[in-house]
Amino acid sequence: MPDTSALAVCVGEGLVSFVPATAGPLEEARTFHRSLAGAEWNTAIALASAGIRTAVVSRVGDDGFGRFLTAELRQHGVDDRGIEIDPDAPTGLYVKELSSGPDGSIDGTMHYYRSGSAASAMSPGTFESSPASDLLAESALVHTSGITPALSDSTRAAQDALFDAPREGRLISFDVNWRPALWRGREDEGRAVIASYARRADIVFCTQPDAEAVFGTADPDRLRELFPEARYLIATSPSGAVAFDGSERTESEALDVPVVESIGAGDAFAAGFLAGILAGLSLTGSLARAHRIATRALISTRDHVV
């Protein structure tokens, strides 16, 4: 059983996702389903579903979408007290465009409308006021990603503050989550920024496409050579994952399950692994838990586990 006394805090932007009822070009879509999205928020929901006490620190607009997001967190058992309400800036959103694959699976393309959002105004000050500061002080683990520092100068400063603060036994988890659209025109800077966080994190997650795009290699052993600082390094691909704990190395195959759509599966995978670590499972056990929880995000067009 997980250690239910351990608190995991996820830091990043929550988004409202609009998903068409049927696959096809957006100009032909008439009906959309609304749901919660955002990498760190997806991970928070999956952590809570695994029995981990979880909170989110972020910002949303003082609007219906912001109230929807915080209500969704509470419904899934995630503490939302660390979320600031911005009286002026809106809550970010995106629209997913669905296309049918030849094997019956569905591919999703995301169209973001998040510029100037409330979350893009996160700053080091976001973490200094209660209850966010209290949650972070109590946390056993803080999870964030490469999306946050790409949103604005202030969010990058906020991420730096998280990584530079005294850890006092707290683990910092970092998911690369390379979003080229957010780094457009400054890709080299983005790659350097992402690499710097990977070197300062205790736990690093990286998918095969992200590793190739950011680090120039998806070979797990080469990635371990590039980033020896992290205690845990987890490299994933559609076929499975390779995980390192120091010099220990283990690998596993992905579970054979029907895939409806893969967006959000990486967030659920990270949550499963983190839940295993917080529960004191072995590297192999944590990896097995990661695969099990990831399958729950593959069975729908929602981004988070259901």
Image (tube, grey):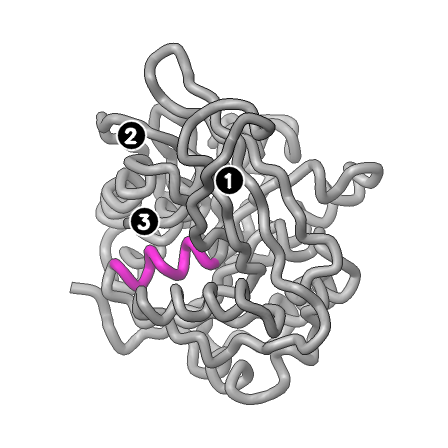
For discs 1 and 3, the disc positioned in front in the rendered view: 3
What kind of element bears circle 3?
loop
Residue type of the residue flagged with mark 3: Val
Which residue is drawn at the image coordinates 53% and 81% (left, top)?
132
Q: Is residue 119 in view?
A: yes
Q: Which mark is residue 206?
A: 1
Provide the major secondary structure of the magenta segment.
Answer: helix
Please say whether residue 44 is one of the residues in the magenta stretch: yes
Q: Estimate the x, y position of residue 228 in percent, counting from the top left.
A: 54, 46
> Could you tell me how far apart the alpha carbons at marks 1 and 2 are, in whole angstroms?
15 Å
Residue type of the residue flagged with mark 1: Cys
**Label 3 Cα crowd, 10 Å radius (few <14 / some 14-19 / many 20+):** many
Which contiguous range is marked in magenta? 41-49
Which residue is drawn at the image coordinates 41% and 29% (left, top)?
22
**Label 2 Cα crowd, 10 Å radius (few <14 / some 14-19 / many 20+):** some
Q: Estimate the x, y position of residue 267 in percent, counting from the top left.
A: 42, 47
Pointer 3 residue: 305
Q: Estimate the x, y position of residue 90 in percent, counting from the top left.
A: 66, 64
Please say whether residue 72 is one of the residues in the magenta stretch: no
Q: Estimate the x, y position of residue 129 in percent, counting from the top left.
A: 61, 87
For discs 3 and 2, the disc positioned in front in the rendered view: 3
**Which quarter of the image is occupied by the N terminus?**
bottom left
Foreground residue among 93 and 193: 93
**Label 1 Cα crowd, 10 Å radius (few <14 / some 14-19 / many 20+):** many
Pointer 2 residue: 254
What kind of element bears circle 1?
strand
Which residue is drawn at the image coordinates 53% and 75% (left, top)?
83
Q: Earlier in the sequence, mark 1 or mark 3?
A: 1
